Image (cartoon, helix red, strand yellow):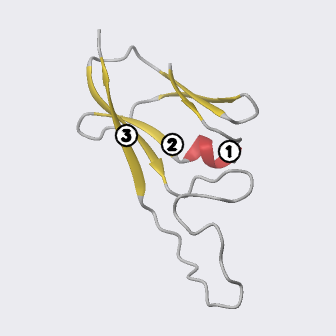
Amino acid sequence: ALVIQFPKPMDYALAKRVIDVSAKGGSRIAGEVRLLNYEARWRFIPAADWVAGRHELVIQTTLEDLAGNNIGKAFEVDVFEQVDRQVPTAAVTVAFDVRQ
């Protein structure tokens, strides 16, 4: 399994939807996602055995903790200023290698 340990619980629905694992070349790897430890641990079990080589963990910046904080927007917003309502669709990618 591939495991991510967050320092605080994450939004369950978003964590299930906006975190993916892909193989070299960008093809998504099918598998089962489970959230454990009160949504502070994300665990991915691939549907098939891991293939040796480079893989990527892709996390969209819309992922939020339970307080609504995410890396795609400022945590504190002045309510007297106009707020841009567009949600960026950027993602953070972390490469990792599977060895056998």
State whether residue 13 is above or below residue 1.
Answer: below
Task: Residue 95: name its quadrant.
Answer: top left
For badge 3, the amino acid type reads Val
| The one of 27 and 55 positioned closer to us in this rendering | 55
Q: Residue at x 29, y 8 (%)?
A: 100
Query: Dot 3: few (<14), some (14–19), or many (≥20) neighbours within 10 Å?
Result: few
Q: Which residue is mark 2?
A: 19
Mark earlier in primary sequence (1, 2): 1
Q: Is residue 19 above or below residue 77?
A: above
Of badges 2 and 3, nearer the viewer stands 3
Q: Measured from the top left, where is residue 80 in percent x and y?
A: 70, 91
Q: Residue furthest top?
A: 100
Instruction: Determine the CA span between mark 1 and mark 3.
Output: 19 Å
Q: How many marks?
A: 3
Q: Residues within 10 Å of mark 2 (few under 14, many from 20)?
A: many
Q: Which amino acid type corresponds to the residue marked 2 in the rendered image?
A: Ile
Identify the secondary structure beneath mark 1: loop
Category of crowding for the residue at label 1, using alpha-carbon neighbours closer than 10 angstroms: few (below 14), some (14–19), many (at least 20) = many
**Residue drawn at point x = 29 percent, y = 41 percent:** 26
Q: Please state the horizontal and vertical placement of residue 39, each as a whole percent of the image.
A: 71, 36
Rendering coords of residue 2 (x, y %): 48, 24
3D distance between C-alphas at marks 1 and 2: 12 Å
Q: Tell me the amino acid under the disc marked 1.
A: Met
Relative side of 78 to 73, left or right: right
Whole-percent x, y for residue 1 in the image: 50, 18
Which residue was labeled with disc 3?
A: 94
- 57 relative to 95 in the view: left or right: right
Q: Secondary structure at mark 2?
A: strand
Give the Cα separation between the discs numbered 2 and 3.
Answer: 11 Å
The vertical placement of 49 against 9, above or below, is above
Quadrant hosting residue 85: bottom right
